[in-house]
Image (cartoon, grey):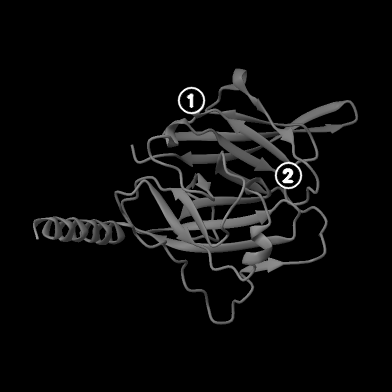
């Protein structure tokens, strides 16, 4: 009888802990409702298009190659008021592109999970994490200039190792391109070419974790050559990294 009582208590404790864990895990944040007539927030084409304008992805480096296209994660800095997370996702081969916005409210959570309601889950699941990149930013209006960019990932990153993860910047550039972090011109980072097919973006620069601060400025520097003359075009990304 005593053994049965102990077993019952043990099973009840396991059940209680499972219920608490389920309650503590928050549901992914869903995107804002679009207007009824806007059914083209994401586009997939079977024909590989020609290369377009400069595109950028900003993501944590990951040890995992596989992804679930219905969920992504972003490290959200402290926000004092409600704002928007503006998200753009692009495939390297140019066949997929999409934009969505999410309402962000003040929270203690560092990394938050977001739901991506794609119609192309099967096709997108075939991509590796480096072949489908995320660009996320904070803004009151996703049609205007971002207030700051944040770092995303297809896979959840434990809080005890997130500070040791390097950051990858993906760009589309036919010329030599480098990254400069916080005006450190002596420590510029050269972007390397990615494997084909390359349409939406073709280069990647990796920023070591020790170069990323709570608030940093990343400059994408492209070389332009016209005959004997060489000039540079710069694109600036203001990055907010953590809640500190």
Q: Residue furthest right?
A: 227
The mark nearer the N terminus, 1 or 2, is: 2
What percent of the width, then of the height, locates residue 210? 48, 25
- Front-most of residues 49 and 229: 49
Query: Pointer 1 and pointer 2: residues touching (CB < 8 Å)?
Result: no
Q: Residue furthest left?
A: 2
Q: Residue at x 30, y 52 (%)?
A: 107
174 relative to 114, above or below: above
**Secondary element at image label 1:** helix
- What residue is pinned by disc 2? 172
The residue nearer to you, when weighing 57 against 180, is 57
Residue 117 sits above or below residue 209 on the image:
below
- Frontmost of labels 1 and 2 is 1
Q: Quadrant of residue 119?
A: bottom right
146 sits left or right of 180 in the view: left
Q: Nearer the viewer, residue 76 or 139?
A: 76
Q: Quadrant of residue 167?
A: top right
Residue occupying image coordinates x 65% and y 42%: 170
Q: Is residue 106 above or below residue 174?
A: below
Where is residue 54? Give x, y as percent. 71, 47
Residue 173 numbered mark, or none: none
Place of residue 84 in the rendered image (x, y in percent of width and height, measured from the top left): 44, 59
Q: CA distance from mark 1 to mark 2?
A: 25 Å
Q: Secondary structure at mark 2?
A: loop
Give the quadrant of the C terminus.
top left
Task: Tell me if 199 is positioned left or right of 131 in this view.
Answer: right
Q: Position of residue 104 (x, y in %)?
A: 39, 58
Judging by the rendered image, the residue that carries numbered circle 1 is: 210
């Amino acid at each position: 009888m005593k053994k049965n009582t102990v077993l019952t208590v043990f099973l009840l404790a396991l059940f209680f802990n499972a219920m608490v864990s389920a309650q503590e895990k928050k549901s992914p944040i869903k995107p804002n409702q679009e207007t009824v007539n806007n059914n083209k927030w994401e586009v997939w084409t079977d024909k590989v298009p020609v290369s377009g304008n400069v595109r950028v992805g900003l993501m944590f480096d990951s040890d995992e190659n596989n992804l679930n296209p219905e969920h992504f994660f972003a490290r959200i800095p402290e926000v004092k008021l409600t704002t928007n997370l503006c998200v753009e996702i692009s495939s390297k081969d140019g066949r997929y592109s999409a934009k969505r916005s999410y309402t962000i409210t003040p929270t203690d959570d560092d990394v938050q999970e977001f739901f991506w309601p794609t119609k192309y889950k099967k096709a997108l699941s075939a991509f590796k994490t480096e072949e489908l990149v995320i660009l996320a930013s904070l803004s009151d209006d996703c049609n205007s200039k971002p207030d700051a960019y944040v770092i995303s990932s297809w896979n959840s990153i434990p809080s005890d190792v997130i500070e040791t993860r390097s950051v990858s910047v993906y760009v589309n550039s036919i010329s030599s391109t480098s990254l400069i972090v916080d005006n450190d011109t002596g420590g510029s980072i050269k972007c390397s070419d990615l494997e084909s097919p390359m349409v939406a973006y073709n280069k990647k620069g990796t920023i070591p974790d020790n170069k990323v601060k709570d608030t940093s400025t990343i400059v994408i520097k492209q070389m332009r050559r016209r005959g004997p003359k060489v000039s540079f075009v710069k694109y600036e990304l203001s990055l907010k990294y953590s809640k500190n």
